[in-house]
Amino acid sequence: MASITYGAQPGHGPNLSSQQQSYLEMVRRKRMYGGILMVIFVALMASGWMTAEMRNAGGFWNGLPQLADFPAEVLTEALAKRAVIPALIWEHVPALIETLNIAAVSTLLGALMAMSLALLATRGLARWPMLIPLFRRSMDALRAIPEIVVALVLIFILGGGPVAAVVAIALHTGGALGKQFSEVAENADLKPVEGLASVGANWSQRMWLGIIPQVAPNWLSYALLRFEINVRASAILGFVGEGGIGHDLKLAMQWGQGRYDQVVAIFLLLFAAIVLIDQVSDYYRNKLVKGS
């Protein structure tokens, strides 16, 4: 009858006490690291709070009772003029369409940029493997700079308007989507690429016929999600003079009392648009990825 053996030495079972001790040591180490990170986090939060409190002219705790004063003032005026809010909502629909156009064009341009950067920065697919770090750092740089910073710089070059907003959002979108597209492409099956290479297909043909069909559903899903984000970004950029519904909201808030009904109308219109876009985008994302 054959004897059952365990471990490295025949006839000896595993050393359970040693395994248990190693496991407990690992748990203690994780708890220690977690405690250190928690202490650092609390220290950073406390120092940041103290710095913000010292630089705040009125003090946070002193101004806390007045937190609801401005919203109450806006809602009071809006309720008094609630009969004209539907007409105001309709009046700002063209500005919303401009915002959606900015988001759509910037998402399209950014997605095209991301496709190129992702394929050039993905290991196993890159046309110039030596330049992979360069393309990856380029995506990091595009992703690190906020849209509003790029927009403020472009205002001095192109002037205020939707063009500067489109360029700013497209650059950031290219960096953000490029990272996600690259991660999807890394998981693609390389057998179609190898088959195309064996019959003499060039790099562009291998990517278009061997990789794009595999990654297209996930890429489109990420692009739709980015479109939702870009709608919000284009509305925010309106506050720095880039047009769209954000610009109208800025003007209405600057006028103060007497225009708060327009503020509420713009908020309602923008909220309804974002909810609708979110629902439609979520439906098509699930359909693309899950096929349901």
Image: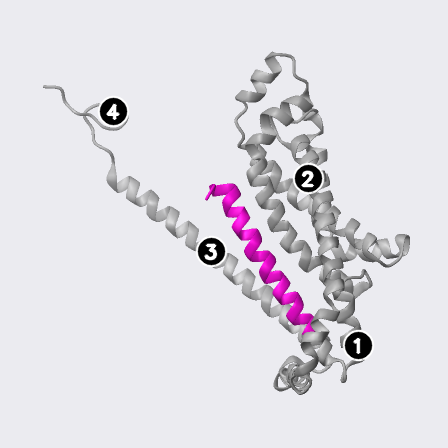
Q: Secondary structure at mark 2?
A: helix
Magenta segment's dominant SS is helix
Magenta stretch, residue numbers: 265-292
Mark 4 burial class by Cα count in 10 Å: few <14, some 14-19, many 20+: few
Q: Earlier in the sequence, mark 3 or mark 2?
A: 3
Amino acid type at circle 3 is Gly
Between the C-alphas of marks 3 and 4, the distance is: 37 Å
Tell me the element at label 3: helix
Q: CA distance from mark 1 to mark 3?
A: 47 Å
- Residue at numbered disc 1: 254
User: Residue 118 at what x, y percent from top left?
Assistant: 65, 35
Q: Are marks 2 and 1 in contact (CB under 8 Å)?
A: no
Q: Which mark is residue 114?
A: 2
Residue 172 higher or lower than 87, as above or below: above
Report whether residue 73 is seen.
yes
Earlier-in-chain disc, 4 versus 1: 4
> What's the CA distance linking mark 3 and mark 2?
36 Å
